[in-house]
Image: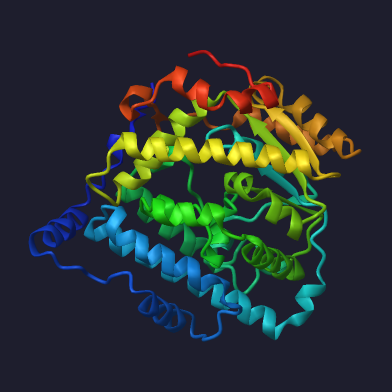
Amino acid sequence: MPREFTFRDARVRSPSVLALNAFGRVTGFPWRGFDADAIVADARRHAGLDDPGDGSWREPLDVLCDALPGESGLTSFGRTAARAGIVGALANRLRVVDWAARHPEVHDERVERPWVIVGMPRTGTSLLSFLMELDPHARTPTQWEALDPIPPPELATYTTDPRIAAASRQLAQLTRLCPPLNALHPMDAGLAAEDVSILMYGMRSWQFETLAFAPGYGRWLDAADMRPTYALFRTVLQIWQSTLPVGVWSLKCPQHLMHLDALLDVFPDARLVWIHRDPVRAVGSLASMVMAYLTTSSRGLEPARVAAYWTERMVAAVDRASRVLADRDGVSCVHVHYEDLMKDPVRTLRGVRAASGEPLDPLHQRRIEVFMRTRPRDLYGRHVYRLEDFGLTASAIDERFASYVRCHDVGPEAR
């Protein structure tokens, strides 16, 4: 029987981290703060570069740095980790901009008809991404590439690149600090990366909000113009495929729901695959996942407040995405239901491909069958949650998502 984890089990119990947090509480020592200019200076030193490209990154950085001290409840460890995440993302931006400037030919690379998986978190987007990635002609960015994107990986050394081992050590350190995190979302250098990891380079990413609770930043982000960040995202893909050619990119990110209009402006021929699931199951699991991440780095956060914030955010995301699809002509979007995917993944993927006028490759089908038969279940434990722990009720969630459920014919799961 696998061990069960709740968000409360995500507390970091490392003696060194506990000592660091205790010292910060007793002394009030601020450690290194969130001064935006100092973060920029550190990123430039870290990358050994000065030019971050256009100025689209500055406003979100300022908003994030303003939001973190007052809203997040970060511990000393949490402040250190959040600041390091911001510095690292900005350093990666510097490297991407520099590489593209020194290799302008990468802009001739064509990112054509990418698959883009969207859907609320906890709706099966990761599983669908894994299955799409099994296409022998598809490529999905990996976690190690997102952590250290430049120089682009080379075909001859793609499986032996030393950055794979470095990323493995970094991710293993995180899971040692908090083992339950792997039960929520497996972390491994070779696994598919969430696109939010790459959107971080533009300073416009939900990923920052897994580091710290920052609704001021989140509200700004949801109203922001994402086109500069998606343009940078496209540049990253162009750089990567310039040294390791791809048949087609397979991408995935729940955040895309909130910004479909901007994504389609930059990737007008994107083929969207939107997976739907009973919002009661998705929202409850999302609230627990977010609280688990925040518990590693913050204290004093009320689960009900965090859950209410993310619930309303998901309502806004699915409603906005539905309007974009209704208002824009010619968008390719296949709608997939979670229960259908789980019941018959081969049939589901065959339907996805058929919508683009393509058959399901026999090798792809065989890989799906083998993967579903052999994939490990509950390898790192089982994530469990209760709606009442977050001030949520099934009836209230049903009411808030009624329009979404009607629009996309989303049925209830066993509750």
Residue depicted at x 38% and y 21%: 1
**Viewer-proximal residue among 375 and 49:** 49
Residue drawn at x 57%, y 16% as measured from the top left: 412
Residue in view at x 54 percent, y 35 percent: 315
- Residue 171 visible, this angle: no
Work out whether residue 359 can be spotted. yes
Q: Is residue 46 left or right of residue 406?
A: left
Residue 176 placement, left or right of 60: left
Q: Position of residue 184 (x, y in %)?
A: 44, 38
Closer to us: 124 or 394 = 394
Taking 246 as reference, is 2 above or below it?
A: above
Residue at the limit of the structure toward the left, as seen here: 26
- Residue 276 vs residue 137: left or right? left
User: Which picture quadrant has residue 375?
Assistant: top right
Front in this rendered view, residue 37 or 222: 222
Q: Position of residue 195 (x, y in %)?
A: 60, 53
Q: How many marks?
A: 0
Residue furthest out toward the top:
414
Percent x, y for residue 231? Answer: 69, 66
Which residue appears at 60% of the width and 64% of the height?
160
Res 77 quadrant in image: bottom left
Here the colouring is rainbow
Above-or-below relation of 138 to 310: below
Residue 188: where, in percent of width, then height?
Answer: 50, 50
Judged left or right of residue 135, residue 376 is left
